[in-house]
Image (cartoon, rainbow, N blue to C red):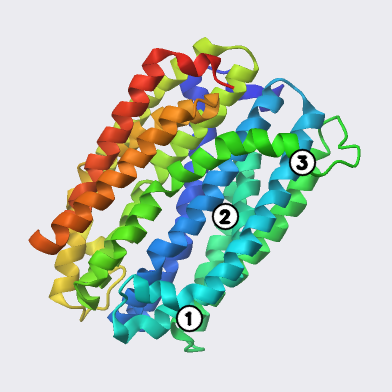
Amino acid sequence: MEKEYLIRKRPAAALLVFALPMMLGNFFQQVYTMGDSAIVGRLVGEDALAAVGASYSLTNVFISIAIGGGVGASVITSRTFGSREYARMKRSVSTALLSFLGISLLLGGVGLSLSRQIMVLLRTPENILDDATTYLNIYFLGLPFLFMYNVLSSMFNALGRSRIPLYLLIFSSVLNVALDIYMVGPLQMGVAGAAWATLIAQGISAVLSFCIFLKELRAYPGSLSGRLFDVAELKNMAKVALPSILQQSTVSIGMMLVQSVVNSFGSQMLAGYSAAMRIESVCIVPMSAMGNAISSYTAQNLGAGQPERVKAGYRASYGIVFAIAAALCLVVQLLARPLISLFMEDGGSAVAFETGMACTRFMGWFYVLIGLKMISDGVLRGAGDMPLFTVANLVNLGLRVVLAVTLAPRFGIQFVWMAVPVGWLVNYLISFFEYRTGRWRRAK
C-alpha cells in the first residue's frame, strides 16, 4: 500500500519523505508565536514584546503538553496501523481525542483562574504585568482548539499523512499573521489583538482538521461498534503519552522555571531574551520533527515485525541531523542581528539587542545536541521503552534549572542559556546508551 512507505521504502528516503512536511508544518506553527512577537514588538513597542515574551514560557508548556500527548498517543495508532488492526486503530483515535478534550478544558479553566498569580510568581516586571495577563487569559480560552489540532496532527502523521497538517498549518499561519496585522495595526488592540488573532486562526484550523480526519478514517475498514472511549486503550496510550509529554515539555518547563530569573534582569533584557527564544523555537523545529518522525517510523516497523529497519533508520537520521545543525549554525552566526531586528523597533535598546544576539549566537553551536537527543528519544518512545527515556528527560530538566537558577543571579543572564546544551548532552548520552542495550526491541 502507498500509505505504508515507512515500513517499505529505504529508511533514509522514508524518513525524509515523512519528516519534511512535518518540518515545514512545525515551522508554520512557530509562525503563530513569531507573528505575535514580531508584529507587537514593531507596531506597539519593546514593552509589548516583553509582555508577550513573559507569558511565552508558560504558553509553550501547554503547546508541549498538546504535542507530546498527541505524539505519545499516536504511537499506538502507528502500531495498529502497521499491523492493520484498523478497528482498534479507530478506537484508540477516538479515545485520545476525548481524553485530551477533557484535559484541555480542565487546564484552560485552571489557567484562567490563576493567570495573574502565575505571572506574579514568575516575577513579571510591574510595567508589563497587565498586558502579559491579558495575553495569557485569551490564550487559555483557545486551549481546546490548540489541543484538538495538535492531537489530530499527530494522528495524521501516524497514518503517514504528514502533508495534510502541513497544508492546514500554512493556511492557519497566513490567517494568523493577517489577523495580527489587522487587529494590532488598524484596530489598535495591542497585545490582546495578537492573542485573539491566534485563537481565531487556531479555532478554524482545528475544526477543518477534524472534518478532514473523519473523512480519512472512513477509508479504512473496521468499525468502532459504538465504543468511542476505551479505558484499556487509554491505559496503553498513557504509558507512552505521559513520558512523551514530559519529553516534549522539558524545554518549555525549564524555560518557565528560569523565567523568573530572566524577568529579574528587567524588561530590556527580557525583550532581547524573548526575541532569541523565538529564533530558537524555529531552529529546533527540524530536530523535533526528526524525533517525531523516527518515533512513528519505529512504531510502524516494530508493529510490522521489522526491528532491523529501526536500526537502519536511526543510523540514517544521524546524517540528517548533522547536516541540519551545520546549516542552522551558519545562519544564526551570520544573521543574528537581522533576526533579532525582526522583533524590535528600530529604536530598540542596545541592551535588548546585545542580549538577544549573545543568546542566539551561543545556541547556534549546540543545535546538533538537541537533534541527537530528539532522534534517540524518538526511537525509545516509538518502541515504548519509557523508563530510561523518562530519566533522561528529567535529568535534562534538572540540570538546566539548577545551573540557571544558581549561576545566572551571581554571574549574569548568559548562564540561563549556557545551561541548555549541558542538559541536551546528558539527555542524549542516557538515551543513546539505553538504545545500545537493545531493550527497546522487547518493550511494549
Specify which label sits upstream in the sequence, 3 or 2. Answer: 2
The local crowd at label 3, few if under 14, some if 14 to 19, many if 20 or more residues have their Cα within 10 Å, is few
Q: What residue type is labelled 2?
A: Leu
Q: Which of marks 1 and 3 is in front?
A: 1
Residue 204 image label: none
Q: Where is residue 312 in the image (x, y as percent from the top left)?
A: 45, 15
Rendered position, 69 above or below 405? above
Badge 3 element? helix
C-alpha gap between disc 1 and disc 2? 25 Å
The correct choice, above or below, for 235 with respect to 104 in the image is above
Residue 15 visible in the displayed image: yes
Quarter assignment of residue 119: bottom left
Image quarter of residue 388? top left
Judge from the rendering whether residue 332 lies leftward or rightward of residue 378; answer left or right. Answer: left
Is 318 rendered above or below residue 111?
A: above
| Viewer can see residue 17 | no
- Cβ atoms at labels 3 and 2 below 8 Å apart: no
Observer-side mark, 1 or 2, equals: 1
Provide the secondary structure element on which disc 2 rests: helix
Residue extending furthest left? 411
Give the residue displayed 21% in from the left and 48% down from the top.
Answer: 419
The residue tagged 2 is 169
Circle 3 sits on which residue?
Answer: 216
Q: Distance between the residues labelled 3 and 2?
A: 18 Å
